Amino acid sequence: MAEQTLTDVMDAPLAEAPSPRGHAAKRAAILDAAMRVFARDGFAGASIDAIAAEAGVSRQTVYNHVRDKENLFALVVEDATVRQNAGLFATLATFPDRPHDLEAELIAFAQRLAGDCLCSCRSAELQRLVENEGTRYPELFKAWKERGPGRLDAAISARLSRLAQAGLLDVDDPDLASRQFVALVTMDLESTNHLGEDPSPAEVEAAASAGVRTFLRAYRPR
């Protein structure tokens, strides 16, 4: 970019854009279309013409809204991260802080976390997109990790710490336990994501149940 870095774009709230209804609708259509095209073709292979066609707008309309392809790419990642975080933190609010049945309630939470947030097609698409372009734009990758996975790990870590303080878990390193929890409840769903599909409810339930039971075998007090 000539005047702004990708980090500058990530730090500028999307709400600062003009907000008449027609403008906002076109902007949303452009960002959604760009997400699909970038995920399919990568940054280098994506073109403004392809994004405009996908969004159903003119090439000039895309430029009027986003200036250039680099700026559009950063805005796409920012928009997708904001949407993903909204779902993540709504789900985190349902974490069982005072469980009556720790295993059952953790499994239910893990199903919501994996099925609704981490293993949806859109979430997997965002992760692949950022990781694939991370070498080209390391500052973008860092910003995404801090705003997305980093915040999730910290939030789950704090909740596991509270369960440990209540005597329900035996956790020496809550940050490590948080990463292990997420990995255990999502790893069996990654192959479905790689095929570009949402996992079925049965797949999510099986993965969450197996992951939580393995987690509790490691961290339940002896």
Image (spheres, rainbow, N blue to C red):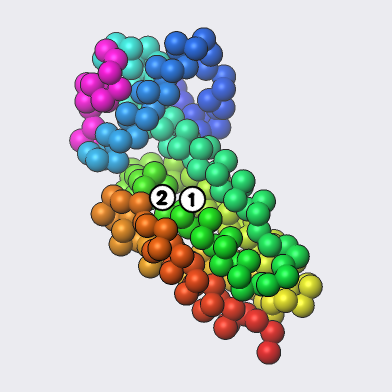
Does residue 140 lie above or below 192 as drawn? Answer: above
Place residue 170 in its image quadrant: bottom right
Q: Return the x and y of residue 61 as percentages of the image width and height.
A: 33, 12
**Could you tell whether 203 is left or right of 15 in the image?**
left
- Front residue of 121/144: it is 121
Which residue occupies the foreground of this view, 45 or 55?
A: 55
Residues at marks 2 and 1 touching, judged by CB atoms closer than 8 Å: yes
Residue 154 pos. (x, y %): 63, 57
| Left or right of 38 on screen, residue 137 | right
* Mark 1 closeness class: few <14, some 14–19, many ≥20 residues within 10 Å: some
Label 2 – label 1 distance at C-alpha: 6 Å
Q: Residue 88: horizontal and vertical position, in percent?
A: 56, 48
> What span is in magenta?
44-58
Q: Position of residue 155 (x, y in %)?
A: 64, 56
**Residue 7 seen in the figure:** no
Say which residue label 1 marks: 116
Give the residue type that dot 2 points to: Ser
In the figure, residue 191 lies in which quadrant?
bottom left
Seen at 57% across and 41% down, the residue is 86
Residue visible at 57% across and 19% down in the picture? 16
- The amino acid type found where label 1 is placed reads Asp
The residue where tag 2 is placed is: 120
- From this viewpoint, is residue 114 visible? yes
**Most common SS among magenta residues:** helix
